[in-house]
Image: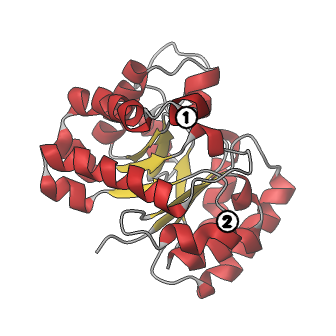
Amino acid sequence: MRKPLVAGNWKMNGSRAKINVLVKGLIDGMKKVGDVDVLLCPPYVYIPAVEQLIHGSDILLGAQDVAKEEVGAFTGEVSVSMLKDSDCSYVIIGHSERRAYYGDTDEIIAKKFAAAIEGGVTPILCVGELLEEREAGVTEEVVSKQLHAVLDHVGVKAFEKAVIAYEPVWAIGTGLTATPAQAQDVHASIRALIAKEDEAAAQKIRILYGGSVKAANAKDIFSQPDIDGGLIGGASLAADEFIHICEAAG
């Protein structure tokens, strides 16, 4: 039985004052959440503040991206060892915004994934298709290519220490959401792709759904057999909304 994971990706949002209120609200609401891993991924500059606020709670800490390099003259970058030194146990890799705005290619993402695995931080690998790709009926081909770029680089065994997040790009921040059946179909295809390489890894890996998940639709989405939780954007910035989503996962 895979334990659900609900991760809040705060993106480039927040201030010290807002984070204090948000995290305290989440800690207060955790008593209503069942057997679910709850993860927060704040901007880099707020990782230490969040680390202090969640100390002693069951909330986990992660980051939104990481460098493929470990040390050196890479101005503005943050390495896996730095994340681990800040008590981050997870890191998001390959988010569609990183792919679209910052030139993260499949090759770069594979190297970041490998760095995370080697450094002992769990990567959350994001995959997903554009609207025109969905309409052209090539969703599975697009997702398969993104996954194989990493599989071919690190091997399937690395996925036993990883998480996958399926995020249809057309549903991120748009208010549009894949139907539970649409999301399940892609999640099942992802698990089947991993199973071709290693059945045990396929059954172990958690596959999250992301894309305008809200309290109102979370229960229907999370009830699907191959959906193991969510990677939540905007809704993770409101304590009550995020707690309701976490409850739905449980």
Compare residues 169 and 38 and report the one nearer the observer: 169
What residue appears at the point 67 percent right and 43 percent down from the top-left corner? 43
Name the residue beneath numbered marker 2. Answer: 53
Q: Is residue 108 above or below residue 82?
A: above
Q: Is residue 134 above or below residue 71?
A: below
Compare residues 131 and 198 and report the one nearer the observer: 131
Residue farthest along the bottom direction in this orientation = 32
Left or right relative to 91: residue 207 = left
Left or right relative to 30: residue 126 = left
Q: Secondary structure at mark 2?
A: helix
Q: Is residue 100 above or below residue 172?
A: above
Name the residue beneath numbered marker 1. Answer: 135
Left or right relative to 216: residue 200 = left
- Going by the numbered disc 2, the residue's amino acid type is Leu
Q: Secondary structure at mark 1?
A: helix
Q: Kindly indicate whether the residue at mark 2 contacts the one at mark 1 (C-beta within 8 angstroms).
A: no
Mark nearest the camera among 1 and 2 is 1
Residue farthest along the top direction in this orientation = 73
CA separation, marks 1 and 2? 44 Å
- Going by the numbered disc 1, the residue's amino acid type is Glu
Image spot of residue 207 (x, y percent): 39, 56
What residue appears at the point 46 percent right and 35 percent down from the top-left corner? 137
Specify which label sits upstream in the sequence, 1 or 2.
2
Compare residues 110 and 230 and report the one nearer the observer: 230
Image spot of residue 159 (x, y percent): 26, 46
Residue 194 seen from this side: yes
